[in-house]
Image (cartoon, helix red, strand yellow):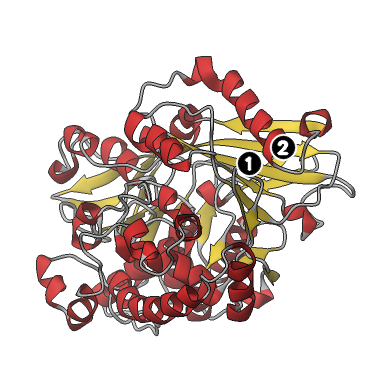
Amino acid sequence: MKKHVVIVGAGPGGLAAGMLLAARGCRVTMCEKDAVVGGRNKAVKLGKYTFDTGPTFLMLREVLDEVFAEAGRDSNDYLKFKKLDPMYRLAFGDGKYFEPASDHKKMKKEIERLFPGESAGLDRYKAYEKKRFELMYPCLQKTYSSPLDFLSKNFRRAFMHFSLGRSLMDVLKGYFSNERLALTFTFQAKYLGMSPWECPGAFTIISYIEHAFGVWHTEGGLSKIADAMAKVVKEHGGTIRLKAPVKRIITEDRKAKGVELSSGERIMADDVIINADFSYAMTNLFRDGEIKQYTRPKLAKKKYSCSIFMMYLGVDKKYTMPHHAIYFADDYKSNVSDIFKRRVLSKDTSLYVRNASVNDKTLAPQGHSALYVLVPVANLTGSIDWKRERDAFRDIVLDTIERKTPMKDLRKHIKREHIITPDEWLSDYNVYNGATFNLAHNLGQMLYFRPHNKLDEVDNTYIVGGGTHPGSGLPTIYESGRIAANLLCKKYGIPYTSKNTLA
């Protein structure tokens, strides 16, 4: 008899687990509160304009390809991929810009253009970080259910390469003497919930992944990945129920027995996989006090990522700008402190603009653009009143764009607009503290110290998504889905083939 697995939420982690389990013969029922799949990976539609809600960088595409292959499918049959070259533009306050490329020769030439004499550091960076990645990534593929997992051969081999006691900036300045150049390899730290001056040095593997494997776009936006995964789930007989929010996990004798929907309907199952925001799930999907490891007071003490102020702009003009562009605040270090320490709004802010219409004609009408503007801001543990600050901060963002980017006349061309503040991340997306990138990734919240893929206190319950191991970001979220699927199959002796043999 087929094992029945209910998955709470159809985000990228839940979809990865769902397609693998359905392909392996399980009966899969996915319950999604929204009218479409994807969660923070879904599309935002504004008339004839299409945007991605969240992720716009597809890195380490190999993990996605592996998940499709393990579900008996080829990702190229479902998605049109484009590798970006250059990967993105990094612009500084003085008007100078830097365009990293994954091609080693192009990247060295670009370094010499803006930072003469520094390109030899790239050779050292690529050589050592390749070794670090090859040792560390298998550690991220393993599940950490016991402190004894730190004694594994893979972990012991990688441990000496963790750069303990050194920050991301410390490590990068070991390769590049120019601080501005070192900074160009660190902007991803914000999305781990940390300043590059505090983020653990081992996270240089994130920028290495970009430089080694490239950055990809999928035609129609990265939301098309979620649509493709959902299609595979259905092809293997899985069921995806939309507009079906889960009210609670049904438990008995500390075992999950199924879920109860907001409608009152109960769906019984052998196992439950939770793909909701982790801290939201622990505080809303179980009875108060049922999960003693993650009570409300304990969760409140954890460290969380920053939030983001999002603007989705449909404009009746095409701009000569790269697909991805990051504009650093004039005083970047102060801007980072505003976000993570002072938790106030910066007048001098950094921002990211995706101008995907330069490469993808499907996102906007001819001659128009679908612009995605992301501004890192403090999460809701600060005291920012977004009802009061929303419109004024919108103006600051638009002023910054018109001052720093080629879009000098942007306001005149906005035809459609949608904004998401940290308040909406909490109210509309159930994101705890509005912390869009979930729990921070400090060493005290990684590996064994991060929420486990199998919930300790309630049997038959698994966790996927950015709030569990191995962490946030699409590749690691897909990996969390694969880990959960593999653990569940091992429990029941369900045969499977997987590139991840460590879970």
Q: Residue 410 in the image: x percent, y percent?
A: 78, 34
Closer to the chain start, of discs 1 and 2, is 2
Marks 1 and 2 close (CB-CB < 8 Å): yes
Find disc 1 in the rendering and name its residue.
Answer: 373
The residue closer to the viewer here, 100 or 265, is 100
Q: In the displayed structure, would residue 102 be above or below residue 255?
A: below
Q: Quadrant of the N terminus?
A: bottom left
Q: At label 1, which amino acid type do we have?
A: Val
Q: In the displayed structure, would residue 192 be above or below residue 419?
A: below
Q: In the displayed structure, would residue 23 be above or below residue 344?
A: below
The residue closer to the viewer here, 479 or 154, is 154
At label 2, counting other C-alpha atoms closer than 10 Å, the crowd grade (few under 14, some 14-19, many 20 or more) is: many
Q: Give the left or right position of residue 414, taking residue 379 as reference.
A: right
Q: At label 2, which amino acid type do we have?
A: Leu
Task: State whether residue 88 appears in this view.
Answer: yes
Q: Secondary structure at mark 2?
A: strand
The numbered disc on residue 313 is: 2
Q: CA distance from mark 1 to mark 2?
A: 8 Å
Name the residue rendered at 24%, 58% in the picture. Answer: 452
Name the residue rendered at 45%, 72% in the picture. Answer: 20
Name the residue rendered at 59%, 49% in the picture. Answer: 42
